[in-house]
Image (spheres, grey):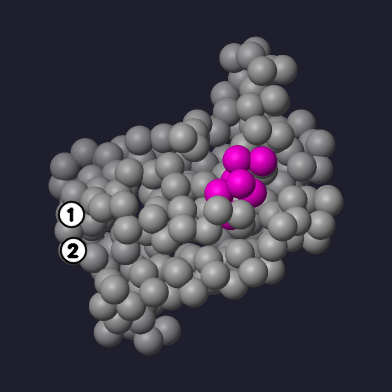
């Protein structure tokens, strides 16, 4: 069983991690039952989503793509406009007043403290976008003309990259700058289309059974 936040609550970074894990499980041909929980963050042993429940074991997280995680956290919580318009309302949506405001500002304070600890608090938004662009360039060069990063067979890396890139491409933010950085690399776009078609569109057509699934956007 695979757990993550409910759709209207989940943030960009959590959505990317959730999609990455689900993609990897599908690549492995494993049956997955997805559950949306408002308190998923507090059910996880590490305090982070997504997490999976297999038998008697609960395992959380799949190693992140560090640069993307930093950039997305910065944009969500350190850019005041995005935090006000999107991040705080989404994060606080399951809770009533005044807890919704308290928890949202507490989350923002925690993230900003982490950004300060890793030396990102002094970055400008333009510098963060440049970091994302450099990361995309490195990924694009590594992928080249191959269908996957290690040629013909998808691996954990493909699941991780897809989860983060696809979420950036399909999540509405206060501007499209982050998505545009990804769109400038045609092989990364093709890579996302390939995995979406292979591991989501085909699976969805095969199983219209009403089981709860991760709700994601769709590439144009």
- Tell me which residue sits at (53%, 66%) in the image: 136
- The image shows residue 134, relative to residue 59, as above or below, that is below
Frontmost residue, 79 versus 197:
197
Q: Magenta part of the protein: which range?
A: 188-194
Q: In the rendering, at what x and y percent does residue 186 appear?
A: 55, 53
- For label 2, the residue is 80
Frontmost residue, 91 versus 81:
81
Based on the picture, tell me whether residue 191 belongs to the magenta stretch: yes
Q: Secondary structure at mark 2?
A: helix
Q: Are marks 2 and 1 in contact (CB under 8 Å)?
A: yes
Q: Quick check: can you spot residue 53?
A: no
- Tell me which residue sits at (71%, 47%) in the image: 24
- Tell me which residue sits at (41%, 68%) in the image: 71
Q: In the rendering, at what x and y percent does residue 212 appear?
A: 57, 24
Quadrant position of the N terminus in the picture:
top right
| Dot label at residue 84 | 1
């Amino acid at each position: 069983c695979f757990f993550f936040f409910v759709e209207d609550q989940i943030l960009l970074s959590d959505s990317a991690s959730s999609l990455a894990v689900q993609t990897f499980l599908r690549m492995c041909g494993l049956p997955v039952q997805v559950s949306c929980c408002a308190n998923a963050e507090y059910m996880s042993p590490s305090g982070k989503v997504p997490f999976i429940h297999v038998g008697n074991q609960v395992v959380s997280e799949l190693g992140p793509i560090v640069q993307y995680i930093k950039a997305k956290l910065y944009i969500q919580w350190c850019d005041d406009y995005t935090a006000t318009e999107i991040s705080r309302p989404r994060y606080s949506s399951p809770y009533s007043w005044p807890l919704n405001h308290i928890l949202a500002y507490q989350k923002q304070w925690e993230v900003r403290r982490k950004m300060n600890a890793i030396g990102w608090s002094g970055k400008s938004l333009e510098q963060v976008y440049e970091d994302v662009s450099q990361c995309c360039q490195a990924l694009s060069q590594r992928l080249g003309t191959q269908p996957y990063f290690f040629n013909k067979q998808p691996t954990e890396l493909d699941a991780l990259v897809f989860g983060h890139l696809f979420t950036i491409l399909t999540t509405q933010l206060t501007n499209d700058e982050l998505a545009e950085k990804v769109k400038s690399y045609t092989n990364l776009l093709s890579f996302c289309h390939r995995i979406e078609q292979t591991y989501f569109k085909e699976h969805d057509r095969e199983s219209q059974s009403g089981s709860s699934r991760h709700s994601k956007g769709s590439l144009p």
